[in-house]
Image (tube, rainbow, N blue to C red):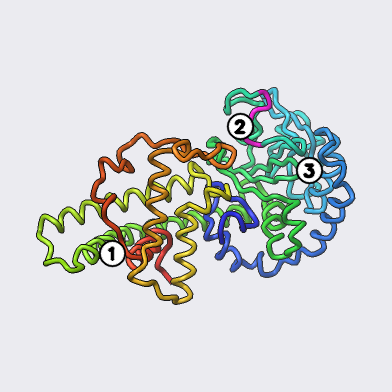
Amino acid sequence: MSPQTRPFRNSNLFSNHYLEKLVKDRPEWRETQPEQAFVAINDLYLRKLRVLENYNESQLEENFIRPVLRILGHYFGVQGKVAGKDRTPDYAFYPDEPSREEAEQHPGEDYYRRAVAVGDAKSWKIQLDKSRKGQGSFEMQNPSFQIDVYLRDTPPKWAILTSGRLWRLYHETTSYKLDCYYEVDLPALLAAGDIENFKYFYLFFRREAFGQTVDGGCFLDRVREESVAYAQEIGEDLLENVYRAMKILAQGFLAEAATGAPVPSQEAVARVQENSMRLLYRMLFIFYAESRSLLDTNNRYYYGLSLQKLKSDVAERLDKGEPLLCVRYSYWDNLKNLFCLINDGIESRRIAREEFYIPAYNGGLFDPAKNGFLESARIEDSFLARAIDLLARSQRP
C-alpha cells in the first residue's frame, strides 16, 4: 500500500505495517460494525458541505465537530481551565457521563483529572502544522505545538486535534516532536465509501479508543505498544538483513565484472565490498529520510521517483513470484537518477518547487566525483531487487 492510497497518514506515531496488516487481526477490528456511524457522519457532512469552509472556528465546532464527536460516543467538557495554568483547551474527553458531570461540579479541582483525552479544534482551512502569524513552530499560534502544551499540562496521555476536515491523534511521549501523529482526512474517507477503511477513523477516534481511565490500557495504547514491539522485531531482523543485503550487492557487482573477465583480484574484491557498503549506506539514508518525511513520499511527483515506490514494486513482483531478468538494469537506473537528484537538488533539473523540493545534499555520500566506482558500475535487477527487499521489510513469516 503506497502512502497515496493509505486511508490514513501515520507520521511516526505507529508502525505503518502494523496499521496496514496487523491491526486487522485485533478483535476490535473484526467485531466493530461502523456502518451506522458512517451513515450519520456522511449525512451530516453532505448537509453542511457548502458552508464548512466559511464557518469560523466556533461555528464549525457547534455545527460539525461536536455532532461528529457525539456520533463517536464521546462525553466531553468544553473550555475547562487547566489547574494552575492560564490555558483552556477546547475539549476534555471523559469515559462516561458521571465523570464529566463530576468534573463540572468540582471546578476547584483539576478539570482534566478524570479525562482520558484532551482536544483542540481549529477552523476548516487552518494548517495544523504552521503558525497563523508565520512565526516559529514552537509557539502557541501553531496548533501542533499548542496540543503538545496541553498534553504536558494535563493528565491525559492522548490528544485529538482537528480542523473538522483533518483529524489527528497525539501521544504525550512524542507530541513534543510536533511531526509525530496519526491523521485521517475525513471527507476523503467519506467520499471513498469504503467501510473497512472508515474503521481507520471510527476505531481510532471513538470514545472506546481511549479507555475508562487515564492510566488504564485502551485500544490506542495497545496499537502503540504492539507497533513498538513490531518495530523492535523488525530492527532485530534488519541487523541480519543488512549483512545479507550487502553480500547480495557485492555478488551483483562481481557478477557484472565477471562477464568476459578473469577471476577478480583480492584488491578488486575489496573495492567491491567497500562500495557495496557505500551503496547500502545510500539506500539506508534514503529509507530514513523518506520515513521521516525529509523526502516527501506524500508528494505524488517525488513518490514516482522514490525508493518507497521502488520498494513497493519489488515487493509486489517478489510476492507474485514474477521473474527478475538478469539482463535488465531498470532498478539501478532508477536509483542512480534518485542519487543524482539528492546530490544536486531539484534546481539542477529546473524542477519547480511547487512540484516538489529536494535541496542539494552537501555531504560526499552521493557525490559522483567521490564515488567513481558507483558511477561506472551497475547491478542487475535480480540482485538489486533482493537487496532492496531485505532492507525494506522483515523476512519473518
Is label 1 or label 2 in front?
1
What's the amino acid at mark 2? Phe
Instruction: Name the residue nearer the viewer: 325 or 41.
Output: 325
Report, in whole angstroms, how far the alpha carbon at label 1 lies from the one at label 2.
Answer: 45 Å
The residue that disc 2 covers is 145
Q: Estimate the x, y position of residue 77 in percent, counting from the top left.
A: 79, 39
Looking at the image, residue 123 lies above or below residue 289: above
Looking at the image, residue 209 lies above or below residue 63: below
* Quarter of the image that includes the N terminus: bottom right
Q: Which residue is drawn at 80% across and 59% down?
A: 37
Q: Estimate the x, y position of residue 137 in percent, counting from the top left.
A: 58, 28
The residue that disc 1 covers is 248
Q: What SS does tag 2 mark?
A: helix
Q: Residues within 10 Å of mark 1 (few under 14, many from 20)?
A: many
Secondary structure mostly seen in the magenta stretch = loop
What's the amino acid at mark 1? Ile
Which badge, 3 or 2, comes first in the chain's sequence?
Answer: 3
Is label 3 or label 2 in front?
2
Q: Do the residues labelled 3 and 2 touch (CB within 8 Å)?
A: no
Q: Which residue is drawn at 41% across and 50% down?
A: 337
Report, in whole angstroms, how far the alpha carbon at label 3 lies from the one at label 2.
Answer: 22 Å
Query: Residue 76's mark?
Result: 3
Q: In this view, does 344 lie to the left or right of 56?
A: left
Q: Estimate the x, y position of residue 145 in percent, counting from the top left.
A: 61, 32
Question: Residue 263: which quarter of the image?
Answer: bottom left
What's the amino acid at mark 3? Phe
Q: Residue at x 33, y 69 (%)?
A: 327
| Extent of the magenta region | 128-133
Q: What SS does tag 3 mark?
A: strand
Looking at the image, residue 322 lies above or below residue 336: below
